Amino acid sequence: MKYPHLCEPIRLGNITFRNRMFSAPMGGTDITSDCCVGPRTPGFYELRAMGGAAAVTASELVVHPQTDASHMFHLDLKTPGCLASWTFVADSISRHGAVPSVELSHSGQYAGTYLIDKDRKHGLTQYGPSDWVRPDGIHVKALTAQQIDDIIRSYGESAALAKRAGFQMVMVHAGHGWLINQFLSPAFNHRNDEYGGSLDNRLRFARRVLQSVRDAVGDGFPIELRMSGAEFFEGGYDIDGGIAIAQGLEDLADLIHVSAGSYQFGFFRTHLPMFAPHGDNVWLAAEIKKHVSRPVATIGALNDPAQMEEIISSGKADVVEMARALLADHELPNKVIAGREDEIVHCLRCFTCMAERPATGTRRCAVNPLIGREIEGIHLTPAPCRKKVVVAGGGVGGLEAAIIAARRGHQVTLLEKKDVLGGILVSEQAIPFKYEMYRLGLTLERQARLAGVEVRLNTEATPELIEDLKAEALIIAVGSRPVIPPLDGIDGDNVIIVNDYYLRKNSVADTVVVLGGGLAGCECAVHLGMEGYKVAIVEMRNQLAPDCNIRHRPILMDMVNKYASVFLNHTAVKVTDDGVVCMDSSGREKLVSGKSVICAAGQVSERACVEALRTSAPWVREIGDCSRVANITAAIYQGYHAALDI
């Protein structure tokens, strides 16, 4: 094996895990009205078990609904079908050789976080270690001693039921600002009884929870403790505090899973965005591992097999855990084991997955069309009749369509008028934090060629060519082109279309105006600011990147505020050698200075090409930007399903 340490089994308690790649907790796809596991969720977890993960952890099982009124999973004997629904989850994981685990959780003062109706959480009673008012104005009520005893008991009861359902490990969630972490944190715990004050007192709740779980599941049954190695906000504990906590709890756990951050004050420390290095939290696990005798797991935007192999081989951690990486490519562990790492579809860290849950209560991944829709089928069925399929356009939507059509047995020819595949994502290669978007095109090209797709570069799709190819099905994926506003000076040598930045990045002057504050413009501005350029963004609307998803947008806006000046409600009038002359909301002209201008005014569908091709075959489907300018998610999803429809 190319990655022997990553692929080596590990034994925790009485269970042997087939490798060191674990699927970290991820909330299920659907939750019923009475908080049971919905019909789509078993398939959601099964996908990662099929993909080779050694353990798959279902999340989050709320242990005490009386004090945690979040609409999340419950496990009890009172609700008909509740235990059975969890049994189906455990079965769906274990049947593929992975160890099924479930995360035992209590949100504490963050109850209601994942409610779609955000007003409802203001009607909940939020419980925590101490009385206080959250920064968002929500009041938190201190738990009584009796409530604490009930919660401790409920952890054990839930663990026992999980074991009965067929789970072979449980994870106790003591990180990210959830209830156990709230007791551990000096920032949240201001009690003056046996649960507050000294470290020993702040550890007491966690220790009693872990002991309750151990008493319920018995010896040899693995218990994984998830904790934040540091909280990363003023008043919270640092790495030294994390080490002390790990030392104080290790005798009651079989695996110490070291994450980072706290929900309200460090969401993007816990869930590293594209602007952060991969593995930016690994050092926390490495430090804690030096001070404990139990195995340690690490997590934090890990998806590169070489990096993960080094983490294990160098002793920084014993296990690597992945969440988003295994949404993007559930086959990642199998590909690592087989030495097919060049076929891994890497997570883009675009937060599509995390934005979908609070928006619709479902799951979706930008690059994996199966996510959240596994019940519709996870295996490709061979086409009943082999057809000649032509795909016009080699962007990611066209590539996805070509791959799936070829895997179903069709004879596929992909036509791309340029000399490279990847479409608009080719331009992302010059922006380091978006490089994985560029790499997506390379990976899909590799998969297409392995699937037997005939790729013709420098070949424009025309009705005549499609007729010559005797196409029985045509998928039009010709994409979009940049919008170039009709301004004086827009064709000057100092103007660079954002799609061409990768070709002309060395000609950018030290002061730059980005014309257009959409997602592409904002991310280009952040990149230039990080590189040391003085950057201004000119946007005619009253906000930046309004179409950006609700998880990515806050961190993007923080980065924009750090690296660029912003001019909202400014309409460009003309471009000069000194910058962009704008009209502000009061009708006054203003020069926004910059020796270079990056035009990021958006994209428009290539409708003329679509109209020329749409009658060129008996069966035709339009996908991606040529149909409606959208995003990677739409292109991949439409390409996948277009190929299924042939």
Image: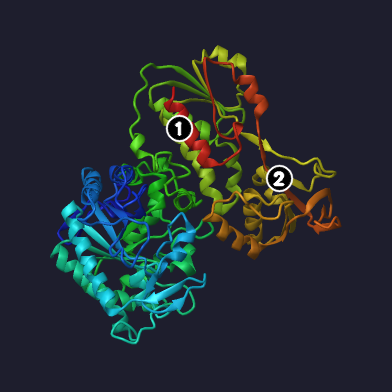
Q: CA distance from mark 1 to mark 2?
A: 29 Å
Residue 558 x %, y %: 60, 63
The residue shown at (42%, 47%) is 362
Looking at the image, which is closer to me, 602 or 628?
A: 628
Residue 153 visible in the shown view: yes
Looking at the image, which is closer to me, 164 or 422?
A: 164
Left or right: residue 172 compared with residue 389: left
The residue shown at (49%, 78%) is 234
Residue 271 x %, y %: 45, 60
Looking at the image, which is closer to me, 582 or 295?
A: 582
Question: SS at mark 1?
Answer: helix
Residue 293 visible in the shown view: no
Q: Quadrant of residue 230?
A: bottom left
The image's colouring method is: rainbow
Residue 24 x %, y %: 34, 56
Could you tell me if the residues under marks 1 and 2 are in contact, i.e. CB atoms within 8 Å?
no
Question: SS at mark 2?
Answer: loop
Left or right: residue 561 compared with residue 170: right
| Neighbour tally class for label 1: few under 14, some 14-19, many 20 plus, Cα within 10 Å | many
Q: Which mark is residue 601?
A: 2
Q: Quadrant of the C terminus?
A: top left
Which comes sooner in the sequence, label 1 or label 2? 2
Q: Which mark is residue 61?
A: none
**Position of 638 relative to 596 (above/below):** above
Q: Amino acid at mark 2?
A: Ala
What residue would you read off at disc 1? 640
Q: Amino acid at mark 1?
A: Tyr
Judged from this view, the residue extending furthest toward the left is 219
**Position of 123 relative to 26 (above/below):** below
